[in-house]
Amino acid sequence: MKEVTLYTKDFCPFCHKAIALLEKKGVKFTNIDVTHDEETFQKVMKKTGWDSVPQIFIEDEFIGGCDDMHLLDKNEELNKKLGI
């Protein structure tokens, strides 16, 4: 299974939805909560060009946000990317 990292904020419903999908699939992931960590959020925004959360990475590949991950799942591409 590949390494998955999410950058989230605690009040974000899309973050919770993305986490729920990964948990449903039994995927271990690292959740980096940037709710009160503006420095880390600025770094990831600079890397991706996005100013919203969640920001989801599989290995070093930025796959986008919650809707992007669910679309990959719907198109049966997510499991392959996750290595499951």
Image (spheres, rainbow, N blue to C red):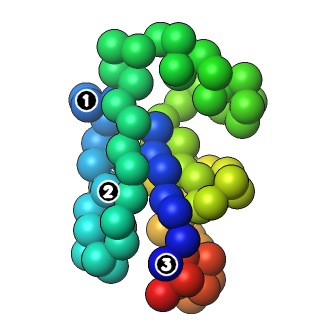
- The residue carrying pointer 1 sits among few (fewer than 14), some (14 to 19) or many (20 or more) residues within 10 Å by Cα, namely few
Is 83 placed above or below 59 here? below
Q: Where is residue 1 in the image (x, y as percent from the top left)?
A: 49, 78
Q: Can residue 21 be seen?
A: no
Sequence-wise, the earlier of marks 2 and 1 is 1
Is 46 placed above or below 27 here? above
**Circle 2: element type:** helix
Is 72 placed above or below 60 here? below
Q: Where is residue 81 in the image (x, y as percent from the top left)?
A: 62, 77
For marks 2 and 3, give the CA distance: 16 Å
Q: Which amino acid does label 1 sit on?
A: Phe
Q: What residue type is labelled 3?
A: Met
Sequence-wise, the earlier of marks 1 and 3 is 3
| x 32%, y 56%: residue | 19
Q: Where is residue 42 in the image (x, y as percent from the top left)?
A: 60, 16
Asked whether, in this view, residue 58 is left or right of residue 11, the answer is right
For marks 1 and 3, give the CA distance: 28 Å
* Disc nearest the viewer among 2 and 3: 3
**Circle 3: element type:** loop
For marks 2 and 1, give the CA distance: 13 Å
The residue that mark 3 highlights is: 1
The residue that mark 1 highlights is: 11
Q: Can residue 50 be seen?
A: yes
| x 72%, y 36%: residue | 48
Q: Which mark is residue 81?
A: none
The residue that mark 2 highlights is: 19
* Disc nearest the viewer among 2 and 1: 2
- The residue carrying pointer 3 sits among few (fewer than 14), some (14 to 19) or many (20 or more) residues within 10 Å by Cα, namely few
